[in-house]
Amino acid sequence: MITNFRLWPESASSVAGGVDLLFLILLVVCTAVSVGIAAFLIYSAIRYHRKSPNELGTQTRYNIPAEVTWTVVPFIFFMAVFVWGAKLYFEIQRPPDNAMSIYVVGKQWMWKVQHLEGQREINEIHIPVGRPVKLIMTSEDVIHDFFVPAFRTKQDVLPDRYTTTWFEATTPGKYHLFCSQYCGTKHSGMIGWIYALTPVDYQRWLTQGAPEGSLASTGEKYFHQFGCANCHHFNNQGRCPDLRNLYMRPVLLTTGKTIIADDSYIREKLHDPDAQVPWGFSANVMPNFTGVVTEEQILALISYIKALGPQPGTQEPSSSGAAPAEYGTQKGIGGPGATSNAGSQVEKR
Ligand SMILES: [Cu+2]
C-alpha cells in the first residue's frame, strides 16, 4: 500500500513555483494537442470513410490559411516556451551575489558537507530559510548528482572540477536529497536530508559550534601542515606568490594571459602546479599535491586563501580604460605593466 502518496511533489524553494508553472503549461498544451489530434483522426476516419466500393476520392491541395496557422501558431508558442525556459534556467544557474556558500563533496556513497563556520555534516545539510544558499560541489570519485525535488534543483557533481547550484528555501522543513546519477552499487543509498530552519533555529544550530573551528582556520592548519607556508610567505619575498588578496583577483600569467584566481584555479595549482604559472615566478618549484591532499582539505585551503581577502565582488571595476590591478604584478618584478604598489591601477596593454 502506498502511504503519503502525492500527485505533485512538495515545493519549498523560490524557483519551485516558476518551474512547476512552466511544466504544467507544457503538460496541459501537449495533452490538449495530443487529444485534439487523436479526436480529429477518429472523426475524419468516420466522416470520410469510403461509402461504396467504387467511390473515388477528391484531392484538395494547398490550404494556405490552414498551413500558415499550423506553422505560425506552434512556432510562436515554442519560441515563447524557449525564452521562458531559458530565463528560468539562467535564474537557476546563477547564484545571487549575496548567497552564503556551503561546500559539498560527493563520494561513493555519501554527501560530505562543510560549512564556512566549521560545521561538518554527512548526508545532512542545515540551512536557513529565506536566504540564498550556494553549494560549491565536487566529487572524490565518479559523477554524482545533487537533486532536491522539493527545491526543483538538480546539478551534476563531477570529479576534478567544481560545479555550483543554489536555492533559497521558502518553508521550514525536512527535504529529501538524492543522488540522481547512477554511481555504483549503493547509489540508491546515497540519500540525505536538507533541514531548512527558521533564522532563529539556524543561529541556534550554528552556535552549537564546530570543534575544529572555522573552515578557514582548518585551512590555515593545513597550510602549515602541507608546507605551503614555507614558500608562500606573506611579505612578497618568498619563492612563490604571496597569497594575500589573491582570491577572485585577475592573475597575470607567464604566457601573458590573465585569469581569475577562483576556486578552480587554486584547486588546479595543487594538482598541476606548473600549469598557468603567475608572471614573475617559475615552474618546477611547487610540488604536486595529487594524492596528498583530499578534496575536503583543498576546500579548507581555498577557504583560508579566501579569508586572506578580498571577498568576491570586491575587485576594482575596470573604468576609463584602466584595468584592475593584476595579482601577478604586485611583486614589482617587471611584468608587463608592473607596479610595485599592489592594488593600484595599471595601464591596459
Ligand atoms: Cu552518487
Image (spheres, rainbow, N blue to C red):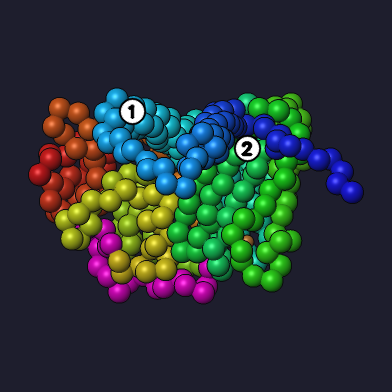
Residue at the image point whose x is 73% and y is 51% from the top: 192
Residue 53 image point, x, y percent: 47, 47
Residue at the image point whose x is 27% and y is 62% from the top: 277
Mark 2: few/some/many CA within 10 Å (<14, 14-19, 20+): many
Kindly tell me whether residue 19 is visible in this rendering. Answer: no
Quadrant of the displayed image that contains ligand 1: bottom right
At label 2, which amino acid type do we have?
Phe
Q: Nearer the viewer, residue 111 or 272?
A: 111
Residue at the image point whose x is 63% and y is 26% from the top: 130
Residue 151 image point, x, y percent: 63, 37
**Quadrant of the rendered structure where residue 196 is?**
top right
Does the segment drawn in magenta span residue 209?
Answer: no
Q: Nearer the viewer, residue 226 or 100?
A: 100
Q: Which residue is mark 1?
A: 66
Residue 142 image point, x, y percent: 55, 67
Q: Is residue 138 above or below residue 94?
A: below
Q: Residue furthest left?
A: 349
Residue 120 image point, x, y percent: 68, 51
Q: Nearer the viewer, residue 185 or 197?
A: 185
Mark 1: few/some/many CA within 10 Å (<14, 14-19, 20+): few
Q: Residue furthest right?
A: 1
Look at the image and give the residue range highlighted in magenta. 276-294
- Asked if residue 258 lies left or right of residue 298, the reply is left
Q: Which residue is mark 2?
A: 151
Of callouts 1 and 2, the N-terminal one: 1
The C terminus lies in quadrant: top left
Kindly tell me whether residue 191 is visible in this rendering. Answer: yes
Q: CA distance from mark 1 to mark 2?
A: 42 Å
Q: Is residue 195 above or below residue 253?
A: above
